[in-house]
Amino acid sequence: MHSLPAEWSSLYPFQTKFKLLSNGFGMNYIDEGDGHPVIMVHGNPTWSFYYRNVVNTLKDTHRCIVPDHIGCGLSEKPRKGYSYTLDQRIKDLGELVDSLELESFDLIVHDWGGTIGIGMALQRLKKLRRLVILNTAAFVDSRIPKRIALCRAPFLGKFIVQGLNGFAGPAAKMSTSKKPLSKEVKAGMLYPYRTWADRAAVYQFVKDIPMHISHSSFKRLVEVEDGLLKLREKDVCLLWGGKDFCFNDHFLERWKRFLPEATAIRYPDGGHYILEDEQEATCGAIKEFVSYTGHNLLDD
């Protein structure tokens, strides 16, 4: 178990586990509780810490599985030999899920974890029972905030993200709308990304956003998008922060076109870190959704 700083470790009181992947690098993950499995996939620049309140809400009734992507959170941070691509991320997550030999699972995704988690689930569609989508995309789109576009610039982007902490640092401030993160929560969010080397994955995630057909991950993203209509066979819930600076309502409307039967709850004052801004409401909605034995409960 990792030794975490006392000032915020009480917010993350979980026994972590470690899976050595076939790529040679170790993936850290939470595996808490018993019952129907719920897999939670984080984005950039968060880690499994982002889902701590969901885990605490569900662990008495569900098995909560929350991995840290390679280079993120408490997982191994490769200095070389790792590709940091969307395809590799999907393979990593799939390898962990397969090793757990789950008969079925529910899935929660956020930010860049949307494409990774859904990409994994589409390859295991018969095992996917329900899906919760939090401010994310899993399809090609031309919209990108100028701040993020700047972080993708050659040379300058790497200096901003890895040298000045100009992505994870500002995200801890910009990603909530209702109230700032507490000192302890902010420290927990930023803990894995304290040095230049620790922030390599943060930069590589930004760099791997496929905005053009020539990008190496563009084809893989299109493959995920092409599979989205298959999710119409599943129970899907969209929980959306209306004041997200990145995944704004344009993306919510696109999701509604892909998945018109999905339950959609929009929190008008919630930011990108919707689980922080609307903790009680979102955790309650998630628990209701993954616990229900019928259909469309959240529409009642």
Image (cartoon, helix red, strand yellow):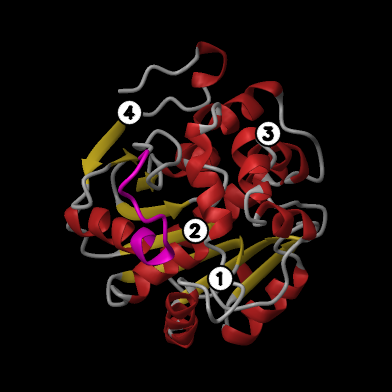
Cβ atoms at labels 3 and 2 below 8 Å apart: no
| Screen quadrant of the N terminus | top left
Q: Position of residue 246 (x, y in %)?
A: 72, 59
Tell me if residue 86 is in the magenta stretch.
yes
- The answer to whether 145 appears left or right of 124 in the picture is right
Write the residue at 42% across / 76% down: 220
Q: Where is residue 51 in the image (x, y as percent from the top left)?
A: 51, 43
Pick the residue in front: 260 or 272: 272
* Residue behind mark 3: 164
The residues colored magenta run 78-89
Q: Which of marks 3 and 1 is nearer the N terminus?
A: 3
Name the disc covering residue 210, or none: 1
Dot 1 or dot 2, earlier in sequence:
2
Residue 99 x/y as whole percent = 18, 54
**C-alpha span from label 3 to label 1:** 24 Å
Q: Earlier in the sequence, mark 3 or mark 4?
A: 4
Residue at label 4?
15
Q: Tag on residue 113?
A: 2
Among numbered discs 3 and 2, the one appearing first in the sequence: 2
Assign the magenta stretch its main secondary structure.
loop
Left or right: residue 45 versus residue 17 is right
For badge 4, the amino acid type reads Gln
Of badges 3 and 4, nearer the viewer stands 3
Where residue 124 appears, x then y in whole percent? 28, 73
Q: Residue at x 17, y 58 (%)?
A: 101
